[in-house]
Image (cartoon, rainbow, N blue to C red):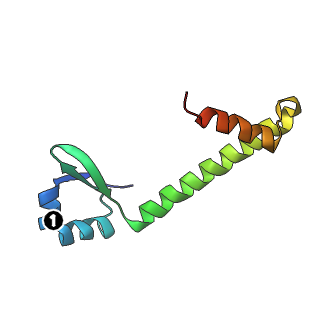
């Protein structure tokens, strides 16, 4: 389980970068960096990033499987490649 997120300003992050990196890497803490009171960046460990990428990959695979199942279940709604591009081009034309 990850610890609570640390919040620092850009100046604090700059002044304490080595310490913050150590907390992220070894202390398993996340760091939110704020500028003018607004969160602008987050520092997370490589392990956390890899975990989030696996979650995203799994979600994309699930959505792809769902789209394929819908495509297979509704053959009457299929359109040709040319018709699809015509629709896209029509949507992109300025009015």
Position of 32 relative to 71 (above/below): below
Question: Which quarter of the rendering shows the N terminus?
Answer: bottom left
How far across and down, in percent of the image, does residue 53 sit? 52, 58
How far across and down, in percent of the image, does residue 95 sit? 55, 27
Report the residue at 25% width, 46% height from top. 39
Task: Decide if residue 92 is on the left or right side of residue 33.
Answer: right
Q: Which residue is under mark 1? A: 14
Report the residue at 82% width, 36% height from top. 79
Residue 29 visible at all: yes
Q: Which residue lies furthest to the right in this view?
A: 75
How far across and down, in percent of the image, does residue 83 sit? 78, 37
User: Could you say which is closer to the camera, residue 66 or residue 5?
Assistant: 66
Q: Quadrant of residue 10?
A: bottom left
Residue 69 visible at all: no
Position of 3 relative to 91 (above/below): below
Position of 54 relative to 76 (above/below): below
């Amino acid at each position: 389980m990850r610890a609570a997120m640390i919040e620092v300003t850009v100046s604090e992050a700059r002044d304490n970068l080595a310490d913050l990196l150590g907390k992220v890497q070894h202390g398993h803490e996340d760091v939110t960096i704020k500028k003018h009171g607004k969160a602008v960046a987050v520092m997370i460990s490589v392990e956390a990033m890899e975990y989030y990428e696996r979650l995203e990959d799994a979600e994309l695979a699930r959505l792809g499987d769902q789209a394929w199942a819908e495509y297979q279940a509704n053959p009457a709604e299929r359109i040709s490649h040319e018709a699809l591009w015509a629709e896209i081009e029509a949507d992109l034309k300025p009015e």
